[in-house]
Image (spheres, rainbow, N blue to C red):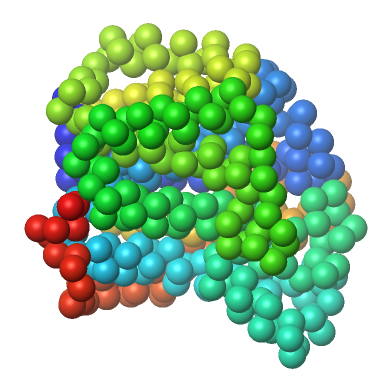
Amino acid sequence: MAKSTSHSNNFGLLRLTFAVCVIVSHSFEIIDGDRSREPLTRLFGTVSLGDLGVSGFFVASGYLITQSFETTPTVLSYIWKRILRIYPGFIAASLVCLMVVAPFSGADMADLLGIGAVKSLIRIVLLARPSLPGAFSEQPIPALNGSMWTIAYEFRCYVLLAILGLLGVLRRRKTFLAIGVATLLLLAFSSIDFNPPSVLHDLLGTLRSSTRFDSLFFSGALFYLYRDKVHFSNVGAAVALPTLTVSLLSAQVASLAIPVLGGYLIFWFSFLSNTERLNSINRSTDISYGVYLYAWPVQMLLVRFIDGISPLSVFLFSTFFSVVLAYLSWCLIEKPFLSLKGASFVAVSSNRENKFS
């Protein structure tokens, strides 16, 4: 049976591992834009280590955020905690990219003046990745921060979960299961996509990406809601791992297997017993978010200023510097703001008794 997420779990280690997977993946394609050299893409031709890392983030987040929603007294308190977890670190990383990284990227810094500053502020509020004309324009992937685009989708999942909770869907877990399955099948068997006009893109994202991330998040949420029914075992993990590995040969099958079999493996590992040393990794000092936010700009600067740098060197140097920046982000920004999550709110019609009605 799935356990509750007390301190005796390995989520911290997993989140850090997922962030490192993204660094490994980007260390190859960020040099010349050739994704086919990335280890997992070369092996299976379907998904990359970065894809798996981001997917793992969303699945684990679905479990943890659903627990947070169900155990938080009011919806406003829940939203406040989610804002404190996402926005301070994101704002700081965006400002670092715009004010510190951009001048070295060849960006047009004049675009930060006047209306450009207003646009950048709006993008930060919408959790859109920072952008300036000319940034890294001579490199294969010209983006100030090519990782931050997923953060908006993460926050939208938080909001969607709150809406479903207020509608009472989380109490009717079979209904939520049907929604989760429908989302997963839509992702696997439908090629329909919708890219909203540019003015709405930062607010809504694309239909395809939303479906992908929702299916992963819902999978994690379902593992939490059915925690009394799901039994994790070493035998189950031994079956799930090779089955998941084989599924990666097909992009369509992988889109089904990663949320389900990958989710099983994530939570099996998270709740392994007698792993006290693993429990302590990235627990009290959670640098995984910061590593994810800062690795890309560090990698881009390395490639820009060191001719002929190898993927291994990009990985090693960017991991070191992103860990340092993530530690500073945690100590100076994220942790202080998280200490405010106990702030009380008077929630209108959102107390513990009626928020699931």
The residue depicted at 63 percent of the width and 21 percent of the height is 251
Asked if residue 217 lies left or right of residue 189, the reply is left
Q: Is residue 322 visible?
A: no
The tally of labels here is 0
Q: Is residue 81 above or below residue 6?
A: below
Residue lying at the far right of the rendered structure:
138
Quarter containing the N terminus: top left
Between 112 and 35, the one nearer to me in the picture: 112
**Where is residue 104, by image quadrant?**
bottom right
Q: Is residue 305 above or below residue 222?
A: below
| Image location (x, y in percent) of residue 127 | 55, 65
Q: Is residue 44 above or below residue 192?
A: above
Asked if residue 237 lies left or right of residue 56, the reply is left
Residue lying at the far left of the rendered structure:
353
| Image location (x, y in percent) of residue 285 | 34, 58
The residue depicted at 55 percent of the width and 68 percent of the height is 126
Between 9 and 146, the one nearer to me in the picture: 146
The residue depicted at 67 percent of the width and 45 percent of the height is 194
The residue depicted at 53 percent of the width and 39 percent of the height is 211
Asked if residue 158 lies left or right of residue 195, the reply is left
Residue lying at the far bottom of the rendered structure:
114
Between 81 and 193, the one nearer to me in the picture: 193
| Image location (x, y in percent) of residue 173 | 24, 34
Q: Is residue 74 visible?
A: yes
| Image location (x, y in percent) of residue 300 | 74, 56
